Image: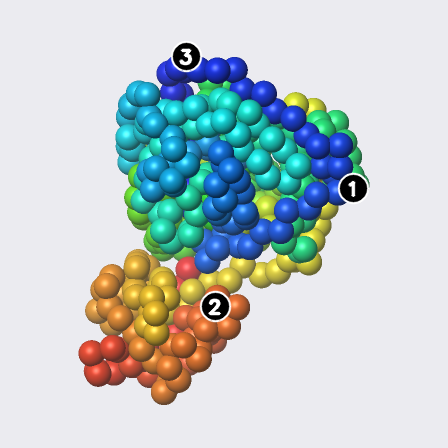
Amino acid sequence: MLALFAPIVALTAPEAATALDTDTEARWVDFELTPYNQLRFPIALNGHTSWAILDTGLSDTIVTSRFARAAGLVAARRQRALAIGGGVEVGWADAASIRFGGLTRSHGRVGIADPAGHIRFGADILVGADILSCCAIDIDYDARRFRILSSGRMPFSGTTAPLRRRIPNGVYQSEVAIAGKMLRPIIVDTGDGGSLTLSRTAWASTGIRDARITTTLGWGMGGPVVTDTLVIPSFSLAGMAPMEAELRIEGDGGFSASVGAAGRLGTGMLLRYRVLLDPRAGRMILQPGKARAAKVPRSTSGLLVELTGAALRVVHVMRGSPAEAGGWKAGDRICSADGVPVAEDVKDGQIEWTVGTPGRVVRVGLCDGTERSLTLADFY
């Protein structure tokens, strides 16, 4: 999960100019989804190439300090900004050019910061709404590619939801319904790997009671964030038929509430569709993709892990889970499961046994040579 910024004081800087090549519509940009569901793609800034994240939930484009040094960017001023996971310090610099997919932005400021999760995402640049809102973005998640179009274009048919830029920070916003309750504004955040996140107040307004709730871990620009999470059966987007969705609930004082939003709609949900984001035309168009009817994957172990070399490192133990009952802790390192080394057990970025059939007993080999038994269960 990547950050959104609170309103940031504008600086005196050369006026930015954005231009599209005449063949921009044919210039698809291939992307890959990171393990945290961010869209990672190649980009050039001041002639220096690197990897970027497409982040409509970010008000201003950000580069890491490492990349800023390589590209000759010098911060003229620094200030604190609010982000998911906590505050961050941002410096501001003029970028001569940013180019991807037939789009070129000349001059205009970029922020210089070091997002807590940027190493995990393998990117040095987060492209925000300040650049993306010039145009329409056609994201084909099934084909893992996107393109930039002139605002007003409708390259495919689908269901339409309202979309506009949120004032004063300029991020994208729309609306959703849960159990028939309309919630707005909802920030549309391609940089957020989750499906849907609500403030605690917005969640309470849905009237849902007796839900089985656990915890999960996300990453924001300011660092890791633990939130309550559950699976709801009655999520509706753009007036379409209700569907199952994973929902995260921020605690009191969470980011969404602090910027006056009911919540955020992330890539975990958007990737079920082909999506056109066109805030200037006031619309988001969604065409169901291959994953539209897919069941929400649920952990049956309660272990959230990340691959580090030939081992899995536990980054979070979900509340009420078999792992919590078994005394697992964040930082535990796993080298095998049922005798299969971790390196041979990862398929398409997934660790199958962590979401395996309830009742299955897994022999988990820790990297210190000990072994534990874990009985999988349906706990949320």
In the displayed structure, 141 sits above or below 76; it is: below
Image coords of residue 361 (percent x, y): 37, 82
Within 10 Å of disc 1 (Cα), the crowding (few <14, some 14-19, many 20+) is few
CA–CA distance in space, label 2 to label 3: 47 Å
CA–CA distance in space, label 1 to label 2: 32 Å
What residue sits right under mark 3 in the picture?
12
Residue type at mark 2: give it: Gln
Q: Nearer the viewer, residue 374 or 116?
A: 116
Q: Residue at x 42, y 60 (%)?
A: 380
Q: Nearer the viewer, residue 232 or 58?
A: 58
Image coords of residue 139 (percent x, y): 65, 44
State if disc 1 and disc 3 touch (CB < 8 Å): no
Q: Residue 109's quadrant in the figure?
A: top left
Disc sitting over residue 341 in the figure:
none
Q: Residue at x 30, y 59 (%)?
A: 315
Q: Residue at x 64, y 40 (%)?
A: 101
Q: Residue at x 54, y 42 (%)?
A: 43
Image coords of residue 177 (percent x, y): 58, 37
What residue sits right under mark 2 in the picture?
350
In the displayed structure, 281 sits above or below 230; it is: above
What residue sits right under mark 1 in the picture?
156
In the displayed structure, 130 sits above or below 144; it is: above
Residue type at mark 3: give it: Thr
Colour setting? rainbow
Residue type at mark 1: give it: Phe
